[in-house]
Image (cartoon, grey):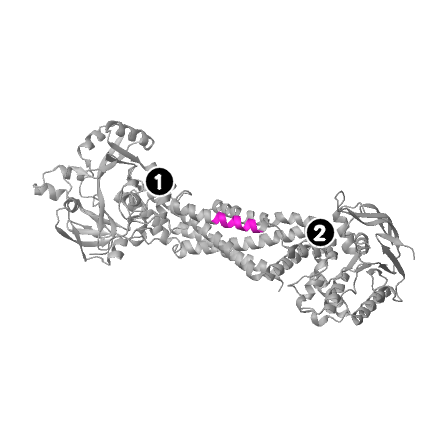
């Protein structure tokens, strides 16, 4: 072994001994430091993964959603608008969506009710648009355009529902059970659950209730000439924003939302200005300031004495600085790795119990989801430079003062 | 051999509290001899000793070690000379608390990066030489005054220095332990080491093994 | 054992655990591709626009669909997505029947 390595090991031995001498203080410091890294790393892992996941999942979301806005509020979208949208060049298809919220006073939760598009493949693609235009009395036409939605073998028919896993958990109901709803006209609608959406999809479907077109209209009293909003498919993906601009120009009270905007919304979610985030970050920053203060405020009398002795017995100033470097490096490396490992377990194995109260907020229904661990080198490096480096530097800097401690100070000690 | 030429040391230079601890000291310290610097407190003994031991620099004048001028060397070289040439025994044992006796003894050798097994053996031998083998793994807080001083002597010897410097070594020892200390000094002399002691204890400067006594008063050497 | 050895042993152990976690991350990332594709497919079929993260109010449930004014006037049990929202409580319900 080269003398250099042996020397570093000696210095580390000695540094650990001196750290252990003030056991309570240093273990407390280490714990606090680990906690800060843990919180920062958990936040970073959680937000990064959820953003990444959102970016992947929401690739499937509609290219353009067109809403109608009146006086700053959403309004029902008239079906008559569809034709004027369709006449814009570059549009491949326009479909309509029917969806809304239902407040369940029993459990105090909000559900998202959604009428799914036809996916059984038996009717034509724009079937729904025609369905609302046909005379409801025409039984044959109704039967031909009856919305058929199938999910994992569960068939959605009038009088039935397919519910998200969160709803199922919350109400403790599953396939075959009935769920009562209070309709717009005061009647109670008892709908039968014909299936449950998969639990792995809870991040997008936890609070969903799939319901047929007719039941949706009956429940909320929406006239057939209205839908919630329209979605537009564009022939050339490069023209999306141009088409959106044209829609806005043609229908002045409309608000087109393009997929990029959706993705951007989720890219900026949990940014540093969000309420909780600023609390977490400022707490962490403050804690670091306290650390740095404690370190930079200088050496205690005991430390000065010790450095004096070390210099008197033949340590150089650089040896003392190396000792302090190891002190900082040891504490921060240990805290860094422990914190990061605990954060990983916390976020990806335990489901972020620390953040749960904050994320749940005041909502009663909260999805159970396992995040996919998206970790990249950049995150880890950022975290490293945010924690290990400042702490180590803060430990070394005041030691420059040690250079001013004369080795003969040890000779001038008169009392212990 | 150590030679001091016209050495001066001024503290707080330029301040109203300016105070000159040494005034034009000329001194030669012979090799393999025991030299005692004697004088009342405040006479500049410790200052002189720290200059001789390369711990501080004189304000003026020159110090030569074996013919080599060392006053103008940069700190790194000075430290290097200090740790290989000098062994220090302080008035206080100046042991570091919280670590074992063995680690305290090995401390001066740490920056040299010697092999641990080898260094440990040297330290244990040194401790055995002063009947401290049983204390090797004790914490320094548990030592008696005499034991603590002997530990500090073992520490001073760990790098096998040729010059031993002791500052008021008997100040905190009773008569019996002081005699014990002088026996150890005799052993050093027998091993061919140069010993420099400051003291105002007659037990030290009147001892038969002392070759040379230097009288200091007000930062000057008084003639015998 | 020497304290420095203990430290390096501990540090090595942590680095190993950490690298296992990184391996776990990249493995589960590839294992999760199916599930992710499934979710994406569900989003496509149901023509969904948002993640079901916060169900407390309509503009938090569908963040991207909220109109630009909603945040000021919504559900009584809502928590705004403005910083101030995280410090206030929603109104307390009257418990008497």
Alpha carbon distance from label 1 to label 2 = 57 Å
Residue A288 is one of the magenta-drawn residues: yes
> Mark 2 — residue?
A316
Of residue C80 and residue A258, the one placed in the foreground of this image is C80
Foreground label between 1 and 2:
2
Q: Taking B161 as reference, is A52 left or right?
A: left
Of residue A7 and residue A29, the one placed in the foreground of this image is A29
Of residue B188 and residue A67, the one placed in the foreground of this image is B188
Label 1 residue SS: helix
Name the chain under label 2: A
Name the chain under label 1: A
Percent position (x, y) of residue A15? 63, 57
Q: Taking A372 as reference, is C2 left or right?
A: right
Residue A58 is one of the magenta-drawn residues: no
> Mark 1 — residue?
A265
Compared to residue B50, the image places residue A247 above or below, namely: above
Percent position (x, y) of residue A353? 38, 56
Residue A327 tag number = none
Indicate the quadrant containing the N terminus of chain B: top left, top right, bottom left or bottom right. Answer: bottom right
Label 2 residue SS: loop
- Any part of residue A137 in sight: yes
Residues rendered magenta in the picture: A284-294
Rendering quarter of residue A327: bottom right
Q: Are marks 1 and 2 on the same chain?
A: yes
Percent position (x, y) of residue B108? 72, 58
Q: In terms of sequence position, does the residue under pointer 1 or pointer 2 come before the other?
A: 1
């Amino acid at each position: 072994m080269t003398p250099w390595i042996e020397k570093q090991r000696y210095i580390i031995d000695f540094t650990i001994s001196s750290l252990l001498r003030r056991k309570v203080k240093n273990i407390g410091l280490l714990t606090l430091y680990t906690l800060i890294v843990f919180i920062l790393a958990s936040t970073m892992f959680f937000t990064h993964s959820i953003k990444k996941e959102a970016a992947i999942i929401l690739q499937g979301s509609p290219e353009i959603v067109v809403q109608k806005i009146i006086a700053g509020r959403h309004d029902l979208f008239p079906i008559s608008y569809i034709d004027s949208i369709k006449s814009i060049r570059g549009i491949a298809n326009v479909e309509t969506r029917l969806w809304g919220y239902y407040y369940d006073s029993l459990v105090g939760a909000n559900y998202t009710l959604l009428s799914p598009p036809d996916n059984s493949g038996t009717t034509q693609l724009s079937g729904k648009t025609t369905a609302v235009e046909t005379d409801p009395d025409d039984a044959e036409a109704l039967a031909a355009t009856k919305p058929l939605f199938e999910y994992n073998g569960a068939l959605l028919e009038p009088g039935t529902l397919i519910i998200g896993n969160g709803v199922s958990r919350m109400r403790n109901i599953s396939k075959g059970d009935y769920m009562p709803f209070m309709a717009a006209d005061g009647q109670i609608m008892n709908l039968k659950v014909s299936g449950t959406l998969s639990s792995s999809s809870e991040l997008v479907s936890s609070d969903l209730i799939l319901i047929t077109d007719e039941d949706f209209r009956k429940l909320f009293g929406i006239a057939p000439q209205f839908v919630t909003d329209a979605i537009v498919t564009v022939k050339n993906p490069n023209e999306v924003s141009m088409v959106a601009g044209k829609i806005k120009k043609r229908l002045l009270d409309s608000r087109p939302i393009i997929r990029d905007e959706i993705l951007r919304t989720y890219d900026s979610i949990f940014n540093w200005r969000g309420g909780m985030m600023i609390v977490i970050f400022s707490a962490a920053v403050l804690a670091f300031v306290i650390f740095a203060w404690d370190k930079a405020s200088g050496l205690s009398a005991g430390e000065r004495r010790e450095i004096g002795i070390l210099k008197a017995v033949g340590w150089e100033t650089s040896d003392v600085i190396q000792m302090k470097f190891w002190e900082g490096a040891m504490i921060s490396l240990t805290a860094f790795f422990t914190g990061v490992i605990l954060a990983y377990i916390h976020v990806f194995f335990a489901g972020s119990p620390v953040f749960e109260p904050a994320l749940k907020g005041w909502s009663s229904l909260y999805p159970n989801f396992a995040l996919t661990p998206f970790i990249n080198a950049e995150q880890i490096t950022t975290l490293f430079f945010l924690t290990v480096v400042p702490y180590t530097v803060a430990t070394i800097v005041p030691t420059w003062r040690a250079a001013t401690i004369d080795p003969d100070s040890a000779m001038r000690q008169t009392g212990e | 051999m150590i030679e001091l030429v016209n050495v001066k040391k001024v503290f707080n230079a330029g301040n109203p509290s300016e105070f000159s601890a040494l005034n034009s000291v000329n001194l030669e310290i012979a090799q393999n001899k025991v030299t005692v610097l004697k004088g009342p407190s405040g006479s500049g003994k410790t200052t002189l000793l720290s200059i001789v031991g390369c711990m501080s620099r004189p304000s003026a004048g020159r110090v030569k070690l074996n013919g080599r001028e060392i006053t103008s060397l940069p700190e790194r070289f000075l430290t290097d000379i200090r740790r290989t040439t000098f062994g220090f025994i302080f008035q206080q044992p100046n042991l570091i608390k919280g670590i074992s006796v063995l680690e305290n003894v090995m401390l001066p050798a740490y920056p040299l990066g010697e092999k641990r097994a080898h260094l440990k053996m040297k330290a244990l031998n040194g401790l055995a030489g002063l009947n401290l083998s049983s204390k090797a793994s004790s914490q320094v807080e548990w030592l008696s005054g005499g034991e603590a001083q002997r530990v500090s002597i073992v520490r001073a010897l760990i790098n096998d220095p040729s010059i031993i410097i002791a500052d008021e070594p008997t100040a905190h020892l009773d008569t019996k332990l002081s005699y014990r200390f002088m026996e150890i000094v005799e052993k050093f002399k027998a091993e061919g080491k140069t010993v420099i002691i400051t003291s105002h204890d007659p037990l030290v400067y009147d001892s038969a093994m002392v070759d040379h006594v230097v009288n200091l008063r007000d930062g000057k050497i008084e003639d015998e | 054992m020497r304290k420095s050895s203990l430290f390096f042993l501990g540090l090595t152990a942590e680095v190993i655990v950490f690298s296992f976690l990184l391996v776990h991350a990249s493995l589960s990332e590839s294992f999760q591709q199916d599930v992710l594709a499934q979710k994406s497919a569900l989003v496509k079929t149901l023509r969904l626009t948002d993640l079901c993260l916060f169900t407390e109010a309509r503009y938090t449930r569908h963040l991207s669909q909220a109109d630009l004014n909603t945040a000021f006037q919504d559900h009584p049990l809502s928590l705004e997505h403005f910083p101030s929202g995280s410090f206030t409580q929603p109104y307390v319900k009257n418990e008497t029947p």
